[in-house]
Image: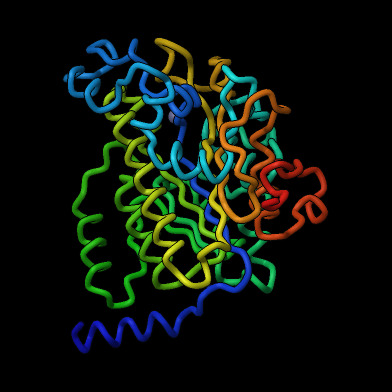
């Protein structure tokens, strides 16, 4: 390491001590269906009509004979580490349902519901309007133990409004905003590439940048609460590209594994950190897989995965009480040992089984 590198490393170390107590990472991947999470790639969609130019290659990568083998090929971290050590909700084929309750089944209403603990009929568009509601991120950041140690890295540029950055003062980096580079050459390079990259869709940064920025933030600033909001799964679905939708989902799973290993390798995080993974909405069935919204009834069905020291290792859930999207906020807080429901009247309770502690 050069002198300069040493100085930067020392500065970063001085910025943040390892977290004391519990930490939590919440990850969303926009509109990834429960159908792929629990059954893997859908054979009926691996064809030209659904934008797959090379069906044989996609089958080779993701098609297997059984749903169990298919889902593990697509999402190996979820189906090895989380399935063994944590819990997965939302396989309707096995009597586990997770539902969006806002009735609209699109992004801002969904993120509002999962981050605040309640659906709000006032949130009825994806417009860049500051959220009148307080998210669990803002609530935590307002508490002494978490102040300045809550951060959100998001692909979609509406998140500064959903989290109400101006009011909440939560660290939010979203869309094609540059990341704070503090003179670091690697982050300056990341910003250069960001500035030189053409968006696929206006307002949505590629997940690769979002993840790299979040991982560096964990290394340098050691947040206690990290929110990673990824967006490509939804973009490729709307673009009618089932191959890229699968690829994006597979990459999200790799990001989860990388982040989890990074956290388990670090003092302060090892054995004390929980991970919650979910989505803002589902999508339609069969040929309607590309769409979601009020008119696509099936898009209210979603999924949630949880792993960490407070979560009994019960794996894939079957025949359990229905869960709602609104329960995510209180679950995130409860994994830190915090009672969100007592502080926020009207918020849905945590998923009891996911936060009851290891036996
Ligand atoms: Zn969408």
Could you say where residue 69 lies in the image, as x and y percent from the top left?
Answer: 38, 25
**Residue 168 image-quadrant placement:** bottom right
Could you say where residue 91 lies in the image, as x and y percent from the top left?
Answer: 56, 24
Taking the image as shown, residue 128 lies to the left or right of residue 139, namely left
Taking the image as shown, residue 106 lies to the left or right of residue 231, namely right
Depth check, front residue: 40 or 239: 40
- Give me the residue at 58% from left, 28% from top: 90
- Give me the residue at 52% from left, 36% from top: 279
**Residue 301 image-quadrant placement:** top right
- Give me the residue at 27% from left, 42% from top: 199
Could you say where residue 31 lies in the image, as x and y percent from the top left?
Answer: 46, 31
171 w.r.t. 42: above or below: below
- Give me the residue at 58% from left, 63% from top: 272
Q: How is the image coloured?
A: rainbow
Depth check, front residue: 146 or 113: 146
300 w.r.t. 158: above or below: above
Depth check, front residue: 274 or 122: 274
Taking the image as shown, residue 239 lies to the left or right of residue 307, namely left
**Residue 241 image-quadrant placement:** top left
Could you say where residue 49 lies in the image, as x and y percent from the top left?
Answer: 26, 10
For the N terminus, the image quarter is: bottom left
256 w.r.t. 320: above or below: below
Dividing the image into four quarters, tell me where ligand 1 lies. Answer: top left
């Amino acid at each position: 390491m050069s002198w300069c590198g040493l100085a930067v490393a020392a500065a970063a170390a001085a910025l943040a001590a390892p977290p004391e107590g519990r930490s939590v990472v919440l990850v969303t991947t926009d509109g990834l269906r429960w159908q792929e999470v629990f059954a893997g790639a859908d054979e009926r969609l691996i064809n030209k009509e659904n934008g797959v130019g090379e069906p044989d290659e996609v089958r080779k990568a993701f098609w297997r004979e059984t749903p169990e083998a298919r889902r593990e090929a697509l999402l190996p971290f979820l189906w090895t580490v989380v399935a063994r050590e944590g819990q997965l909700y939302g396989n309707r084929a096995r009597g586990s349902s997770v539902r969006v309750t806002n009735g609209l089944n699109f992004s801002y209403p969904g993120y509002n519901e999962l981050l605040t603990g309640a659906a709000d009929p006032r949130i009825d568009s994806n417009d860049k309007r500051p959220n009148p509601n307080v998210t669990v991120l803002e609530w935590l950041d307002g508490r002494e133990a978490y102040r300045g140690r809550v951060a959100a890295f998001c692909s979609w540029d509406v998140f500064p409004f959903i989290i109400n950055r101006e009011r909440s003062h939560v660290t939010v980096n979203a869309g094609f905003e540059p990341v704070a580079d503090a003179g670091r050459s690697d982050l300056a390079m990341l910003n250069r590439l960001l500035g030189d990259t053409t968006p696929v869709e206006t307002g949505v940064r590629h997940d690769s940048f979002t993840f790299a920025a979040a991982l560096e933030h964990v290394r340098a600033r050691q947040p206690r609460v990290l929110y990673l909001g990824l967006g490509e799964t939804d973009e490729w679905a709307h673009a009618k590209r089932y191959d890229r939708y699968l690829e994006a989902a597979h990459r999200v799973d790799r990001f989860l594994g990388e982040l989890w290993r990074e956290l388990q390798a670090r003092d302060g995080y090892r054995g004390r950190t929980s991970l919650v993974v979910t989505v803002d909405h589902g999508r339609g069935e069969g040929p309607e897989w590309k769409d979601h919204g009020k008119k696509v009834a099936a898009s209210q069905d979603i999924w949630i995965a949880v792993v960490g020291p407070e979560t009994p290792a019960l794996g894939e859930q079957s025949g359990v009480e229905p869960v709602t999207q609104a329960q995510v906020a209180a679950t995130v807080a409860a994994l830190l040992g915090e009672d969100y429901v007592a502080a926020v009247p009207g918020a849905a309770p945590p998923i009891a089984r996911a936060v009851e502690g290891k036996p």
